[in-house]
Image (cartoon, coloured by chain):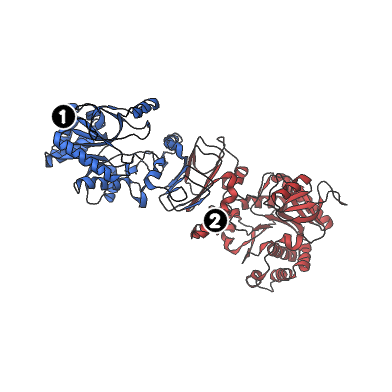
Chain colours: A red, B blue
Amino acid sequence: MILAGGSGTRLWPASRRARPKQLLPLGPDGESLLEAAIRRARAVAGDRILIVTAESQLEATRALAPGIELIAEPAARNTAAALGLAAAVLERRDPDAVLVMLPADHHVANEAELTRLLGLALDEVERDDVIATIGLTPTRADTGFGYLEVDPGAAGATVAVLPVKRFVEKPDAATAGLYVASGRFLWNAGMFIAGARRLLVELDTQLPVTGAAVRAIAAGTAAIAEIYPTLPSISIDHAVMEHAERVVAIPASVGWDDVGSWAALPALRGTDPTGNTLGAPAVVVDASGNVLMSDDGTLIAVVGVSDLVIVKSGDAILVIRKDQAQDVRKVVDALSAQGLARYL
Amino acid sequence: MILAGGSGTRLWPASRRARPKQLLPLGPDGESLLEAAIRRARAVAGDRILIVTAESQLEATRALAPGIELIAEPAARNTAAALGLAAAVLERRDPDAVLVMLPADHHVANEAELTRLLGLALDEVERDDVIATIGLTPTRADTGFGYLEVDPGAAGATVAVLPVKRFVEKPDAATAGLYVASGRFLWNAGMFIAGARRLLVELDTQLPVTGAAVRAIAAGTAAIAEIYPTLPSISIDHAVMEHAERVVAIPASVGWDDVGSWAALPALRGTDPTGNTLGAPAVVVDASGNVLMSDDGTLIAVVGVSDLVIVKSGDAILVIRKDQAQDVRKVVDALSAQGLARYL
């Protein structure tokens, strides 16, 4: 299952309220992150793919996922409800169904390695009914992600499969540094593999209202439009994973990126011989390290500038230093504060 | 008379082949340079204004100059032909007509002082039938302009009216430095004041083909569409002024700017309290010294950048360091070289 319900403005002005990151043509040849996620899903699940998305994004999602089963959330209720609903639907079809939950809006450079590790996770789940998660080996002391603490010395631990001791929230910089130096922490990328029944049992125990609701929706005894919007908005991490027994992590080095800002575009699209990442008709004079994006054929000419992100989308242009790309949120805040929310 | 026939791409992407600098809404409240030139003309000539423009720009010019007489050039033949044609037309109406020739695409901050100096020039012309020119007191050793050498010690010289010894071409940097240090050189801004008859007599002597042609066009004995395009393309400076007797310069310090690049926009429009020049809906975060322009309401958001020019016009965006603003020509050259001339 692919979770494609997110929205956000970290890639403003391309991402807007009505057009989330996973639907944007950011990749090479204009591939969206959702399409790439579908390819990764197909590699482990063939045609047995289910996408959970927001009702408001249903048509746009369907356009990028022809022939794939979609479930529309009438309201965003975070990942516990979305994953629970998928688990309930699939468990009714096959009580032994195993779910591989993949976010729709990440980038993975080494897809073959991810496929191998997901296969390993599936083996573990089928062998021992664990909840498995792909834990990314950190490449820097990033403060933007949650971490998993693993126990390499635990009974049953192997190099490939490690028991998870705890989930930790986004740390401060010093703590992140300690985490990475310790070698015992992995990035939590929200990729989980578990039996549908196991997930539902966990929900029944730890978030019983949601557990009952998603079972009722799947059974057809409750209307999704009525009950789903009333469910608690909580992540599957907080609701289930942090408290569950027998959670294991598969350490992974797969060139993963959460595409959390425009600074990720060079990793996603590569750079051209001038040293710029070009997603627009462009003229480059004495300029390098820039990311140039336009989604409507607008030409971007740059002279004498370096390490900038320049994005034209719709009725707005963003010019931001690449090393400040996280500060797009300041623009978003300013647009609201200045009565310019129509640009969001 | 206002010379509004120019074209060019120094303000690309706003200026295009079909939309020259003087027609762009660059000034405060979107005033064009042409409209500002008309205001300056009105201050010395009332309603007796004549605009010479290109046939291809006739409608766009008329829209900004309602009720003003226009002459359309069927082809651009530089300033000798344009000024000669205006002189011939006006001399037939009034043999004693005096022309004040003003370029349409410059900026003058102190218009009242210019009006005073043009009045002084008119007095000189009417008193002594000289050819007068407004010579700008240089504020820097600019290599982008031609210069006038004046003779402060000549008989008849005053502080306000100086004989012109010679016209000189755009100098190199060292020569420009010497010129400015000498105190004897002024910028030639192409503002001339002279009797129509005097101008025609000079043309008859120095550029007789043009002299005869413009007289014939004005008399109705030759068709402008047939004869005008055959005239030599030469500036009035080269054709007449450099060789004429009794040419005087009125030194002027009027905040003149030829708006030769986007770097001129702060002088034209001023800067806002954030230190940026804003000609677009804008969001500014940690950014100063930038020029932000869009002509279609496109919002420009900048974060962490300084001293850039960012211009959106039509189907193109330019991002250039302000101190490299002259290098727009490199973009224009590259567009041609890369088969992207449709963006010109």
Q: Position of residue B277 (x, y in %)?
A: 43, 47
Per the image, the residue denoted by label 2 is A332
Q: Secondary structure at mark 1?
A: helix
Task: Report the chain holding disc 2.
Answer: A
Q: Position of residue A249 (x, y in %)?
A: 78, 52
Q: Amino acid at mark 2?
A: Val
* Residue B238 appears in the rendering: yes
- How far separated are the C-alphas under marks 2 and 1? 66 Å
**A261 or B137, which lies in front?**
B137
Per the image, the residue denoted by label 1 is B204
**B78 or A252, which lies in front?**
B78
- In what quadrant of the picture does the C terminus of chain B appear? top left
Q: Are marks 2 and 1 on the same chain?
A: no
**B157 or B26, which lies in front?**
B157
* Residue B220 appears in the rendering: no
Above or below, comparing residue A9 to residue B289 in the picture: below
Q: Quadrant of residue B72?
A: top left
Report the label total. 2
Q: Crowdedness of circle 2 by 10 Å Cα count: few (<14), some, many (20+)?
A: many
Q: Which-is-in-front pick, marks 2 and 1?
A: 2
Above or below, comparing residue B148 to residue A103 in the picture: above
Q: Secondary structure at mark 2?
A: helix
Q: Which mark is residue B287?
A: none
Task: Report the chain holding disc 1.
Answer: B
Q: Crowdedness of circle 1 by 10 Å Cα count: few (<14), some, many (20+)?
A: some
Horizontal placement of A150 versus B230: left or right? Answer: right
Horizontal placement of B52 versus A70: left or right? Answer: left
Q: Amino acid at mark 1?
A: Asp
Q: Position of residue A259 (x, y in %)?
A: 63, 49
